Amino acid sequence: NANQLRLTAGNTAWDVRMNLDTMNANGEWEVGVDNTTFNIANTDQGGTPPFNITYDKKIGIGTGSPSYPLHVVTATGGTRAKYWLRDG
């Protein structure tokens, strides 16, 4: 399809990445795939990408290895997750 952007690793040992940079101190973000996990990270901040989706449909926020359908980890041990369920 002529309207697609496709990024392909040239080798199965490589990860696919796309960098988005606003050119300020905290503005460089990276979207990519590490083997079987899709992630979004602020590369200026480093560390574990704060948002990950695994091949088996688990979402991790603050963890690179989610164990549950939605796995949220904070550095301070505070609130792990809040959600609001709307009926209807």
Image (cartoon, grey):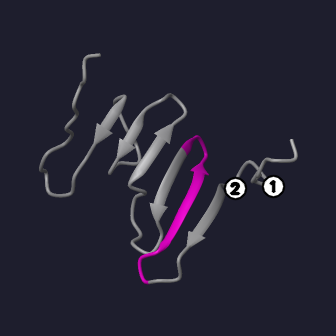
- Residue 9: image x %, image y %? 75, 53
Residue neighbourhood size for the residue with mark 1, other residues' Cα within 10 Å, grouped as few (<14), some (14–19), many (≥20): few
Tell me the tag on residue 14. Answer: 2
Instruction: Identify the residue at the far left of this view.
Output: 78
Marks 1 & 2, CB-CB < 8 Å contact: yes
User: Going by the image, does 11 lie left or right of 57?
Assistant: right
Q: Residue at x 54, y 63 (%)?
A: 30
| Foreground of the two, 23 or 18 | 23
User: Going by the image, does 8 lie left or right of 33?
Assistant: right
Q: Residue at x 65, y 55 (%)?
A: 15
Amino acid carrying mark 1 in the image:
Gly
- For the magenta stretch, what is the residue range? 25-37
| Foreground of the two, 64 or 32 | 32
Instruction: Identify the residue at the far front of this view.
Output: 88
- Residue 78: image x %, image y %? 12, 50
| Foreground of the two, 1 or 52 | 1
- Residue 82: image x %, image y %? 19, 38
| Cα gap from disc 1 to disc 2, whole angstroms | 7 Å
Q: Residue at x 53, y 77 (%)?
A: 22
Pointer 1 residue: 10
Task: Kindly state the secondary structure of the residue where label 1 is placed.
Answer: loop
Task: Kindly state the secondary structure of the residue where label 2 is placed.
Answer: loop
